[in-house]
Image (tube, rainbow, N blue to C red):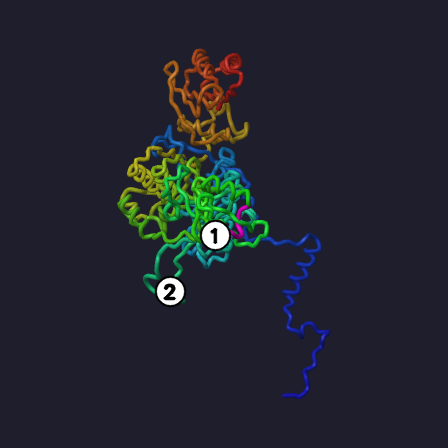
């Protein structure tokens, strides 16, 4: 070894072993920094597409499925089948700011999950299948394996537009709760910060899915037994309801039958030394005096003594703290929810449905009941657009049965096919949504719930394809046939929902079928004059029937285009409403 140090040429940058590619990247970064102000940003491959996806309108509508429903006309619960991105877009205007609580259990992205592969160029199914956007059955779910170079990016691209649209639906006092595990928790937290704002983070709730490290020991000898529920509020107006106080556990009692109700002992001595609160108080019955630093002023303690609120103990007086004076009748909850054994849920579903192993890791029913009970008021609406097995709907019904609440649910799930050799397929269920609805039916029957649910399916518009052709592509025969733009297979309920979607009206209001002049009339959310929608989709619209409908004075009256043989008939209808009900909006579809 030489006793002389090696000479370094400071003018030669290559002698310093610096990565020239990195230098070039840094140079470009500084150039960009000069052009625009630097700031923190959360980005991924596909973010621009996700932004576009959230903003793009849907071309879908909702088709009514009375045969799949329970109490279709009267139920205020919704079960929507179809792509949840389209579902959220169809809910945007009708339920803007009206949802009190959102709960979702999305794919955890473990490497075995299926995620939505959204693509706006879905006009040709064959093209999508070849590109891998759809499977052979037309499903947009694709397996997201860890070997995929865009493993995390694809998951974020799927989640962003759905969460962005979900935020719009929440009321200002509403909150969203998302189940997740460690695979995507970090990315989800940052994503939610960017959509809802860091200041609207509520809490990271933890719950245990098993009580011990049973089975094969993990490679690192640490068994993960918990999962998370990430919660964010729409604004700063949200607050948990909390849990009902247990008088005995909280120390409330009424041994002296005080007319003011249960009370517990509470200190009146202050832990902080304050000269203005250091004085003597006297027991008016015995004359015994107590000198101390008190938590209350002299005047306040005087009033408390006169009001018989002081408990005169030998060593130190205390006060009666009455239950009715508590700031909140409920007490706060802790963010560690404790144990909700998944095995109990598996047994419950097997007993309810008669088979098992259809849903992978469905959320425990008791966990959902507890979450909803501490989060949602009795007169509220909860949305779950990753409904899966239908646990959220089941929990809502059970809570209502237990406490007399009137909570409503809107759940959405994809009509994903069941595996061919599965127990569900053997039992006659070809799609997941069929099992979810049956679970809700059986759970409702078990507890005596009669609220039911209204089933709707995300579908293509009811307009004939010729509607989108130009005049040059049509001849006179086509024009005459297309006076009625709607396909012949659309039911009256389908036409009604076309109206509701177009008019941004809620989808779960009461429906009444009436007869006028022996003709079928549909009343939707009709409570009397200047309320709701009245529809006539028959072919025998007479002057008398028109007058009877106008006399109802609804906010909206709807007729089919094909009902009118001549334009003069349409003019006559408008004139009848102008005279009888000028505030009614008349619409022809």
Residue, disc 1: 204
Query: Percent x, y for residue 563?
Result: 45, 18
* Residue farthest along the right direction in this orientation: 11
* Residue farthest along the front direction in this orientation: 287
Q: Looking at the image, is 404 positioned above or below residue 11?
A: above
Of tags 1 and 2, the one toward the viewer is 1
Residue, disc 2: 218
- Is residue 84 in view from this perspective? no
Asked if the residues shown at circle 1 and circle 2 are in contact, with their CB atoms under 8 angstroms apart, the answer is no
Q: Earlier in the sequence, mark 1 or mark 2?
A: 1
Q: Nearer the viewer, residue 283 or 198?
A: 283
State the SS at label 1: strand
Q: Nearer the viewer, residue 561 or 542?
A: 542
Q: Real-space Cα distance between discs 1 and 2?
A: 25 Å
Q: Nearer the viewer, residue 82 or 479?
A: 82
Residue drawn at point x = 32 percent, y = 35 percent: 449
Q: Looking at the image, is 199 positioned above or below residue 462?
A: below
| Magenta stretch in the rendered image | 289-297
Query: Percent x, y for residue 525?
Result: 44, 25
Q: Quadrant of the N terminus?
A: bottom right
């Amino acid at each position: 070894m030489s006793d002389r140090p090696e000479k370094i040429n400071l003018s030669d940058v290559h002698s310093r072993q610096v990565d020239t590619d990195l230098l070039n990247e840094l140079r470009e970064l500084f150039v960009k920094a000069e052009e625009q102000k630097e700031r923190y940003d959360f980005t991924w491959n596909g973010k621009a597409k996700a932004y576009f996806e959230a903003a793009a309108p849907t071309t879908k509508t909702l088709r009514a499925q009375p045969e799949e429903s329970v109490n279709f006309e009267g139920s205020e619960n919704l079960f929507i089948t179809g792509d949840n991105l389209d579902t959220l877009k169809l809910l945007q205007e009708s339920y803007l700011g009206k949802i009190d609580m959102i709960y979702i259990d999305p794919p955890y992205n473990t490497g075995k999950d299926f995620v939505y592969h959204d693509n706006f160029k879905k006009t040709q199914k064959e093209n999508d299948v070849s590109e891998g956007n759809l499977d052979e059955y037309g499903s947009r779910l694709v397996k997201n394996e860890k070997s995929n170079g865009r493993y995390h990016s694809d998951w974020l691209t799927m989640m962003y537009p759905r969460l962005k649209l979900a935020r719009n639906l929440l009321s200002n006092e509403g909150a969203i709760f998302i189940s997740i595990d460690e695979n995507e928790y970090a990315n989800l937290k940052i994503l939610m910060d960017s959509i809802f704002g860091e200041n609207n983070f509520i809490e990271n709730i933890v719950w245990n899915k098993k009580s011990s490290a049973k089975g094969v020991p993990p490679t690192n000898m640490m068994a993960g037994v918990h999962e998370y529920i990430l919660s964010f509020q729409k604004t700063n107006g949200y607050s948990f309801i909390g849990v009902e106080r247990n008088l005995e556990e909280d120390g409330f009692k009424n041994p002296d039958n005080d007319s003011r109700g249960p009370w517990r002992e509470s200190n009146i001595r202050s832990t902080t030394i304050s000269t203005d609160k250091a004085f003597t108080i006297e027991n008016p019955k015995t004359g015994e005096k107590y000198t101390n630093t008190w938590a209350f002023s002299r005047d306040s303690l005087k009033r408390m003594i006169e009001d018989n609120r002081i408990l005169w103990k030998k060593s130190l007086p205390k006060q009666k703290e009455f239950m009715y004076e508590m700031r909140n009748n409920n007490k706060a909850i802790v963010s560690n929810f404790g144990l909700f054994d998944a095995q109990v849920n598996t047994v419950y579903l097997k007993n309810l449905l008669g088979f098992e192993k259809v849903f992978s890791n469905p959320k425990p029913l008791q966990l959902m009941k507890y979450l909803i009970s501490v989060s949602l008021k009795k007169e509220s609406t909860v949305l779950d657009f990753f409904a899966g097995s239908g646990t959220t709907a089941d929990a809502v019904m059970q809570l209502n049965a237990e406490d007399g609440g009137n909570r409503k649910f809107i759940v959405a799930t994809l009509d994903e096919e069941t595996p061919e050799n599965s127990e569900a397929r053997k039992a006659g269920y070809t799609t997941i949504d069929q099992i979810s609805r049956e679970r809700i039916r059986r759970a409702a029957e078990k507890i005596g719930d009669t609220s039911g649910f209204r089933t709707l399916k995300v579908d293509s518009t009811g307009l004939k394809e010729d509607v989108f052709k130009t005049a040059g592509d049509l001849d006179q025969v086509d024009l005459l046939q297309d006076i009625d733009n709607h396909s012949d297979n659309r039911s009256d309920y389908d036409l009604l929902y076309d109206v509701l979607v177009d008019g941004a009206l809620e989808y779960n209001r009461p429906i009444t079928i009436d007869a006028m002049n022996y003709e079928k009339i549909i009343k939707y959310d009709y409570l009397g004059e200047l309320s709701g929608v009245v529809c006539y989709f028959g072919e025998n619209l007479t002057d008398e029937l028109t007058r009877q409908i106008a006399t109802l004075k609804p906010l909206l009256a709807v007729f089919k285009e094909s009902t009118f043989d001549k334009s003069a008939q349409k003019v006559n209808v408008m004139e009848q409403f102008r005279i009888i009900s000028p505030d009614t909006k008349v619409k022809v579809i």
